[in-house]
Image (tube, rainbow, N blue to C red):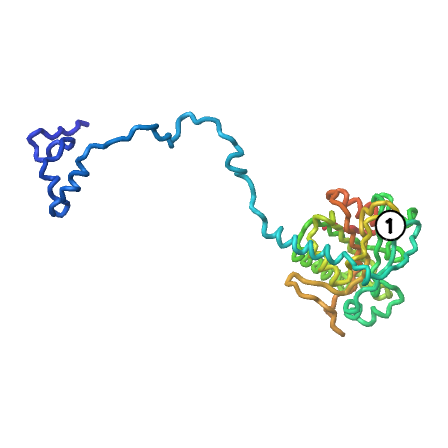
Amino acid sequence: MDRPPLPSSNSSYGDPFANPPPSSFRRGACGSPVSQAVREHNLAPARFSPGPRPSFSGGFYPPGPVDPNAYGDPYGRPASVVSTSTNGVDSAWRRRQTIKRDRGVTRKVKLTNGNFITEYPVPTAVFSAIEPNYRQSSTTEFSHMRYTAATVDPDEFNEEHGFSLRTKMYNRQTELLIAVTSYNEDKTLYARTLHGVMLNIRDICKTKQSKFWRRSAEEGNPGWQKIVVALIVDGLEAMDKSVLDILATVGVYQDGVMKKDIDGKQTVAHIFEYTTQLSIDATPQLVLPQQGDANNLVPVQIIFVLKAKNQKKINSHRWLFNAIGKMLLPETCVLD
């Protein structure tokens, strides 16, 4: 493609690089006269004062070496809002574990084969919420929470070493063992899971379609006595302490009862046992049994295993199968 010819010297456009005529300096953009001071300023030659030249602020290629620490960590994460709120809950929980000497009550507990195993009365509000026909039980599973400070490996948590579980003590045959393992789930997720499990247990015990569960109820052996729920938390430090508030509300946990060591032996796991008829849904709303309501939750036997340290999920499964499972010998185990 041919380029168009350049304008000649006689063209009306003129030379674009030529100095403008003197008349263009005498009038402004709107045709007004320009002052002599402005003309002198515009036409005066530039003058430079002697001295060192200013440093060059641009860059060169290739660039020089760069200190990776000069601008901070580009992958650094800002502080988590969730972590801040959790730390507040954690601090409040730690304060509740400290009992003042003038308000505390000293109890002498006889060790069972060198193991710390004792029962604590549940709050009156929890016990009163249980249906009257269950409160009249000859056992303490509704009136007291049972605490065990386990100082042994899961393989050694057995009767030979002086340990026991309520269901085993009551000579109940466990048909179904439901396990829920967790690490640092928040209270909403935990409440939703636990409430869902309790609803399913109610449906199992009240179903008319299963001959086994229907016959068990007709023979005077309530189905809920054949089902155990094991809650296993992988580490006290990492867990969301608000989950403990959920469990305390339904009677499974109490503040200030955990023992760090027994006779110089470090506690490996804190084990709480309680049979509850209370639950908290994901709203969260406290679910209480109502007198004569067929939709009430049935009692649920809960074993809450709170491991002192984070030892990963395999160790949690060992507590389920090698410790609890070996003692209860369930027919079926469901792992959530």
Image quadrant occupied by the N terminus? top left
Q: Nearer the viewer, residue 198 or 181?
A: 181
Query: Image height check: is 4 above or below 114?
Result: above
The residue carrying pointer 1 sits among few (fewer than 14), some (14 to 19) or many (20 or more) residues within 10 Å by Cα, namely some
Side (left or right) of 34 relative to 314: left
| Picture residue at 8% right of the left edge, 32% below the top | 11
Q: Nearer the viewer, residue 292 or 282?
A: 282
Question: Residue 164: x, y in percent?
Answer: 88, 52
Helix, strand or loop status at disc 1? helix
Residue placed furthest toward the left: 10
Total labels: the figure holds 1
Residue placed furthest toward the front: 50
Side (left or right) of 149 relative to 61: right
Side (left or right) of 67 relative to 155: left
Question: Residue 135: x, y in percent?
Answer: 83, 69
Residue 99 visible to an observer of this rendering: yes
Query: Image height check: is 8 above or below 258?
Result: above
Q: Nearer the viewer, residue 327 or 127?
A: 127
Q: Which residue is mark 1?
A: 327
Please state which amino acid type lies under the numbered disc 1.
Answer: Met
Q: Nearer the viewer, residue 20 or 221?
A: 20
Question: Residue 220: x, y in percent?
Answer: 86, 66
| Picture residue at 16% right of the left edge, 31% below the top | 17
| Picture residue at 74% right of the left edge, 68% below the top | 296
- Image quarter of residue 109: bottom right
Query: Image height check: is 266 above or below 64?
Result: below
Residue placed furthest toward the bottom: 292
Question: Residue 289: x, y in percent?
Answer: 74, 69
Side (left or right) of 118 relative to 29: right
